[in-house]
Image (cartoon, rainbow, N blue to C red):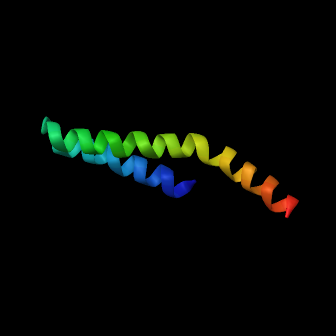
Amino acid sequence: MAEFGGFRALAEQGLKAVGDAPARRRRLELMRDMYAFMMDRFPALLDEWDELRVKR
């Protein structure tokens, strides 16, 4: 989880650095949003994995 947060923060820093360059901003926004999504969904995925592992 810390890695997801770190990459998201890195994307935020990049957005501050690139200014108004549309293509660069879009890539960094997608990166930021993807890691935010992963931070949100990963805990449930780990819970699901634990349940499957226990059943084996």
Give coordinates of residue 25: x percent, y percent: 22, 40
As drawn, the residue found furthest toward the front would be 56
Rendering coords of residue 11 (x, y %): 33, 47
Residue at position x 13%, y 35% in the image = 20
Is residue 17 or residue 48 the one in the foreground? 48
As rendered, which of 36 and 14 lies closer to the eye? 36
The single residue placed furthest to the right in the displayed view is 55
The C terminus is located in which quarter?
Answer: bottom right
Judge from the rendering whether residue 52 lies leftward or rightward of residue 30; answer left or right: right
The number of discs equals 0
Q: Quadrant of residue 12?
A: top left
In the rendered image, which quarter is residue 16 located in?
top left
Which quadrant of the view contains residue 24? top left
Q: Residue 48 in the image: state x and y as whole percent.
A: 74, 49
Residue 44, above or below 7: above
Q: Nearer the viewer, residue 17 or 3?
A: 3
Name the residue: 40% across, 47% down.
9
- Residue 22 placement (x, y as % from top left): 15, 36
- Comparing 33 with 6, the one in front is 33
In the image: residue 17, left or right of residue 45:
left
